[in-house]
């Protein structure tokens, strides 16, 4: 799954104005364990943060997309400004997130 060129779903999003982007990533669910913060795109979570998985996160500013593979490949998960205490809250069955980027207008 997530390895072909077809579109499986589409969603209209409302971007809030501004140019601030900030996200906090947690190695465990419910915002526990080590926390890492980012304000820029990340093509490899493992290289930058040494995290094999992301179990919870807080989107503090902007909108973001999580990808299941490095270099922005694989299944995508859209995250708006809010707290996500477990992967199911952003629509994933597992905590496998290997890259992410912010969405800009």
Image (cartoon, rainbow, N blue to C red):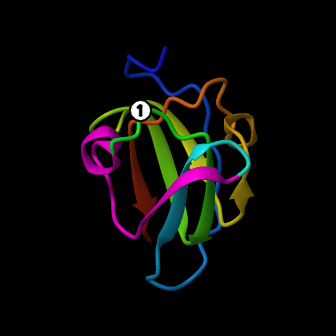
* Residue at position x 46%, y 81% in the image: 20
Tell whether position 46 is magenta: yes
* Residue at position x 38%, y 17% in the image: 4
**Along the line of sight, the residue nearer the viewer: 13 or 28:** 28
**Along the line of sight, the residue nearer the viewer: 49 or 60:** 49
For mark 1, what is the residue? 52
In the image, 71: left or right of 5? left
Extreme residue toward the front, this view: 33
The stretch in magenta equals 31-49
Give residue 61's quadrant in the image.
Answer: bottom right
* Residue at position x 72%, y 59% in the image: 83
| Percent of width and height locating residue 3 | 38, 17
| Percent of width and height locating residue 73 | 35, 32
Of the 4 image quadrants, the one containing the C terminus is bottom left
| Percent of width and height locating residue 38 | 41, 65
Q: Residues within 10 Å of mark 1 (few under 14, many from 20)?
A: some
Extreme residue toward the bottom, this view: 18
* Residue at position x 74%, y 48% in the image: 30
């Amino acid at each position: 799954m997530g390895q072909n060129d077809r579109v499986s779903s589409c969603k209209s999003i409302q971007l809030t104005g501004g140019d601030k982007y900030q996200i906090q990533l947690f190695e465990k669910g419910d915002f526990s364990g080590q926390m890492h913060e980012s304000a820029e795109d990340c093509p490899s979570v493992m290289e930058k943060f040494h995290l094999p998985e992301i179990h919870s996160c807080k989107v503090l500013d902007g909108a973001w997309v999580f990808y299941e593979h490095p270099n922005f490949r694989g299944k995508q998960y859209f995250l708006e400004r809010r707290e996500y205490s477990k992967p199911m809250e952003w629509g994933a069955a597992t905590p496998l997130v290997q890259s992410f980027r912010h969405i800009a207008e």
